[in-house]
């Protein structure tokens, strides 16, 4: 009881510690609002804020954010010595369940994602993500290493703050669990949404296991991400058919389960941001697909085409729109003269500029799109039943005759998935569930540890 009271008092001090100032970071997908608190004054504070802007913009470009995500950030003294240090920690500030629009009943959703799924701010005026970073690093508390506030890979003897912030924000968006790793108990009322995406090798989901089974599973080094998009991305990039999660024999709160396996995920791929230890340079090439599996809308893009869905999900029978932006001049220069859109199911409506006759529906002649270097076109998809719709964009090399017949040779492509989910609507007499205050504070997990300097890759 005393521990709960202490946690409650700490939480209340956070709530009433007004941030110094706030800043909206706009990206291709939406807006992330940074509320700067302790440690952001003076010249050093300005350097820190610049790093946070860059990291927040990466996620604002990647995720479809219809409801702005508010992040409170602070620099303060955290654990640090020559033998080890915590660079930073972050997590959802609160969780919600059984709100109107929730895809799954009796499931805790991180508040930033819950707001997107509900289509409104479920807790007006509150922050969505709480993040803290270690100010002591600037004093060289870990073997003389200090923060690097610049861009690109840091010099030896410095930690890239950008990489750390990029990593921790992913935890705040929901890449973390509230599962008690010590006793295997799930949160009161139901499992969290993240843990429902983790299974053992046989396919048994962690949420379906008994507490005793979960205690063994989280230290088995044999847990895997259960999500089609991240699994497909791993297969395409690294040739791995399963995405291994960090489940070492020695369980560590804030690290175990809330990361991909460092030794397995990067076997033949770029360094992934969501590993359990500090990375000098990385990219969330797998984390964004995992967040999409969880329900976040994601902006999918390659060198020539960008696809931005209007929302994370749509209900069966509802229309979902996708903004397709084509770098027309760049594509034509590369010999790409047409685009074909193919959907796995549902009804696709192409923009009027692309549709000239029914036999060519789904085909777009780039020469018919005017003279602009870049063109944005709306696609709409409707599906009557719950499920996923895969959208494939084929970039075609086609001469005039081939374009006239809606044909061409495929030279590149891009794919994405849209989810049509039957929502769990909260009963009128039942308010949407909120996690107990004492437990919310415990969610500030997702620690980025560093135990020894990593060599440059």
Image (tube, rainbow, N blue to C red):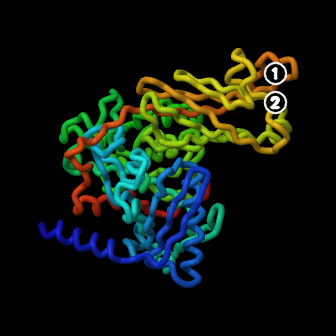
Image position of 247 with respect to 398: above or below: below
Residue at 23% x, 46% y is: 186
Say whether disc 2 or disc 1 marks the residue closer to the N-terminus: 2
**Neighbourhood count class around disc 1 (C-alpha, 10 Å): few under 14, some 14–19, many 20 upward:** many
Image position of 209 with respect to 348: above or below: below
For the N terminus, give its image quadrant. bottom left
Asked which secondary structure carries label 1, the reply is helix
Image position of 433 with respect to 131: above or below: above
Q: Is residue 288 left or right of residue 363?
A: left
Q: CA distance from mark 2 to mark 1?
A: 8 Å
Q: Within the image, what quadrant is residue 12 found in?
A: bottom left
Asked which secondary structure carries label 2, the reply is loop
Q: Within the image, what quadrant is residue 449 found in?
A: bottom left
Q: Give 346 or 107, whichever is nearer the viewer.
A: 346
- Callouts 2 and 1 close, C-beta under 8 Å: yes
Q: Give 386 or 395, whichever is nearer the viewer.
A: 386
Residue at 23% x, 41% y is: 427
Q: Is residue 20 left or right of residue 432?
A: right
Q: Give 373 or 416, whichever is nearer the viewer.
A: 373
């Amino acid at each position: 009881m005393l521990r709960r009271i202490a946690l409650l008092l700490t939480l209340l001090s956070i709530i009433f510690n007004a941030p110094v100032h706030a800043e909206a970071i706009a990206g291709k997908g939406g807006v992330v609002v940074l509320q700067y608190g302790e440690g952001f004054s003076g010249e050093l504070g300005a350097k820190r804020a610049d790093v946070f802007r860059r990291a927040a913009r990466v996620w604002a470009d990647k995720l479809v954010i219809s409801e702005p995500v508010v992040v409170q950030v602070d620099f303060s003294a955290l654990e640090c010595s020559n033998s080890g240090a915590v660079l930073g920690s972050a997590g959802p500030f609160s969780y919600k369940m059984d709100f109107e629009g929730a895809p799954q009943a009796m499931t805790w959703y991180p508040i930033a994602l819950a707001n997107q799924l509900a289509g409104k701010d479920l807790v007006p005026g509150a922050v969505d993500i709480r993040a803290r970073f270690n100010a002591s690093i600037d004093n060289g508390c870990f073997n003389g290493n200090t923060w690097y506030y610049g861009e690109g890979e840091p010099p030896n003897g410095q930690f890239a703050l950008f990489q750390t912030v990029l990593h921790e924000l992913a935890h705040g968006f929901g890449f973390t669990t509230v599962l008690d790793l010590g006793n295997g108990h799930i949160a009161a009322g139901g499992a969290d949404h993240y843990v429902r995406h983790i299974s053992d090798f046989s396919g048994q989901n962690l949420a379906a296991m008994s507490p005793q089974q979960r205690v063994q599973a989280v230290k088995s080094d044999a847990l895997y991400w259960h999500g089609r998009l991240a699994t497909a991305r791993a297969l395409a990039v690294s040739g791995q058919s399963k995405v291994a999660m960090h489940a070492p024999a020695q369980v560590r709160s804030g690290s175990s389960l809330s990361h991909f396996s460092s030794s397995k995920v990067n076997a033949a791929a770029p360094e992934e941001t969501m590993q359990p230890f500090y990375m000098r340079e990385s990219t969330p090439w797998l984390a964004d697909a995992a967040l999409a599996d969880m329900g976040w809308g994601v902006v999918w893009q390659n060198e020539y085409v960008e696809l931005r869905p209007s929302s994370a999900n749509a209900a069966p029978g509802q229309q979902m729109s996708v903004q397709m932006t084509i770098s027309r001049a760049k594509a034509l220069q590369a010999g790409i003269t047409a685009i074909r859109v193919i959907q796995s199911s549902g009804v696709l409506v192409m923009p009027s500029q692309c549709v000239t006759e029914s036999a060519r529906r789904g085909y777009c002649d780039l020469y018919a799109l005017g003279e602009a270097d870049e063109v944005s076109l709306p696609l709409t998809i409707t599906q009557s039943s719950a499920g996923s719709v895969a959208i494939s964009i084929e970039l075609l090399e086609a001469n005039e005759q081939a374009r006239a017949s809606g044909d061409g040779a495929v030279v590149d492509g891009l794919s994405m998935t849209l989810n049509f989910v039957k929502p769990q609507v909260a009963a009128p007499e039942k308010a949407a569930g909120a996690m107990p205050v004492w437990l919310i504070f415990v969610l500030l997990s997702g620690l980025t540890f560093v135990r020894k300097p990593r060599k440059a890759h």
